[in-house]
Amino acid sequence: MSNGTAAHATKETWKEVFQAASDEYLDQVFFHYGPTNGTLAGYHQYDGQLEDLSRKSIDAEIAALKVFEKRIEAIHGDPAALDLTTRGDRDIVLSSIRSNLLTLETIRPWEKNADNYSGTCANGAFTLMERKFALPDDRLRSLISREKQMPALLGNARINLKNPPRIYTEIAIEQLPGIVSFFEHDVPLAFADAQDPALKAEFAQSNAAVIAALNSYLGWLKADLLPRSTGDFRIGADTFSKKLLYDEMVDLPLDKLLEIGWADMRKNQEHFNQVAKELEPAKEPRAVVEQLGSYHPAPDHLLDAFRATFDGLIGFIRAHHIVTIPSEVKPIVEETPAFMRATTFASMDTPGPFEFHATEAYFNVTLPDPSMKPEEVEGFMHSFNIGTVISTAIHEAYPGHYIQFLWVPQAPSRVRKLLGAATNVEGWAHYTEQMMLDEGYGQPGAGAKDERESKILRLGQLQDALLRNARFIVGIRMHTGKMTFDEAVAFFQKEGYQSKETAMVETKRGTSDPTYLYYTLGKLEILKLREDLKKKQGAAFSLEEFHNKFLGQGFPPVRIVREAMLGDGSPAL
């Protein structure tokens, strides 16, 4: 055997060893302890299982993660023995393991966050309802199996929850009536076409038991847990840095990240103020923000307003060679499911990479609640001004999340189809909002009817960018003890150009989603990668080819995509 053949054999052996280990990690740990994610991915052997959040199960998961961490760490040998994709996959799997260990052992949401338990019940049911991947009776059978495990799950909450932060308990109390209503109305409606009378009778029992358990849980949260919820939601600088390293492969010091975040925020504020002055020379930028809100579709035309953006966006993407669109099928625009309305204005719900039966993608849009007074409806609709409608359609659909989802089948491995980073997924969607306007979308005749509307579209994009800038700074400062909750709310309003209502929702989210800087962070990493590749390729650089190659890597941390596309280990920021 020649040296070349021996090296090749070693390479193949290492690759096979890693693939076997990563497959076992995904099947024996990742989906075993997260069966709802299994259903979402399209693995329907998990449909009857529900997350077990008992202390015994949590300890078993921690032990299993540590076994696989050692096993994957041992697969290295000579770095050249693994090809670039497999080396990247190994880093992704190790990061996934370490992130889960950090969550379970250090951040400990199972001990602090009451919403985790009731939310798991809602998600467990919703994942069996949202897609008709099997006959109604078969999915109902799986739902009954999950529902029978829900009272015990809520029982474990009463054992596990110790001195949680007050804000977490308040959020759980705020969310629970919607979850109860979801089980009372939405769940039975979703299975109205089930046929088997015995199955329907069994479901009536299991569903009633879940509703009773949720109501009892709500009563317990109010009477027992809330008065003793005096814990701290802040995770601290050390844990924050580790979470960023494991989730996003970003190892910059937090003070350096803050410098980057502030610089981008100031740049976007200046750009906003400049365009606002051009639009309304006599008004202060703040007044223009308020005025922008009034340019919105009628509530009963909102879904149609989003649908109406698709053809123009697709046409522009194709005419300007932005990115290859792998399918002609468009996402289905529909109203956000009831239990999700409290926390989202719009979202993209795509099928998992291994879902081959129900492959529809849903673009969810939250409409005003019918109980709202006219002035409340008007306030709510300010979030959907014509600028943010376009920005949101770009982010969620073309060429944002939906296009990225269409590229997932071309990802180079199972690991890349299932594990990824928010800096890639949300960074890509946020990057496309700016990139599309920079490339000329939103100019008169290309998404805007005149110069005035063109400026409004740019202000919508910048207002969304400032929201993400504020998240970047609030997340770091709030979780390192440099900013209080109330100071964060004020920051979203003053520096992020957001309403009081939006500022409150965003700050609440930041208490349990500390690293929600990943939108801006990912966008900046992608912009730097693009510029570095342009410098390297010169006249040969093609924007479409850059986007296609980026999406073809799956959705790992941008550092891994960068190494694959540039062939070096240069810094991502």
Image: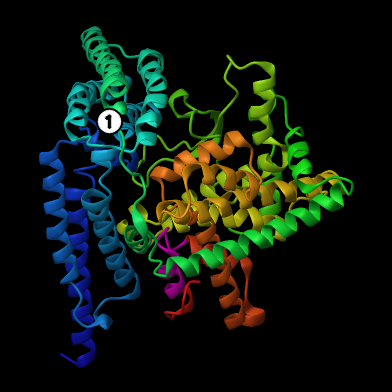
Q: What element does badge 1 sit on?
A: helix
Is 374 inside the magenta-drawn segment?
no
Q: Residue at x 20, y 22 (%)?
A: 151
Tell me, yes or no, if residue 337 can be seen here: yes
- Examine the rendered structure and indicate whether residue 496 appears above or below residue 110: below
In the image, is 442 to the left or to the right of 283? left
- Please state which amino acid type lies under the numbered disc 1: Arg
- Examine the rendered structure and indicate whether residue 185 appears above or below residue 80: above
Q: Residue at x 10, y 40 (%)?
A: 56
User: At which x and y percent is residue 514?
Assistant: 41, 50
Q: Residue at x 36, y 49 (%)?
A: 234
In the image, is 410 to the left or to the right of 388? left
User: At which x and y percent is residue 55?
Assistant: 13, 39
In the image, is 247 to the left or to the right of 209? right
Q: Quadrant of residue 216?
A: top left
Q: Which residues are magenta?
A: 552-564
Q: Quadrant of residue 170?
A: top left
Tell me, yes or no, if residue 447 can be seen here: no
- Foreground pick, 350 / 150: 150
As drawn, the residue found furthest toward the right would be 282
> Which residue is the site of mark 1?
228
Mark 1 Cα shell of 10 Å, populated few (<14), some (14-19), many (≥20): some
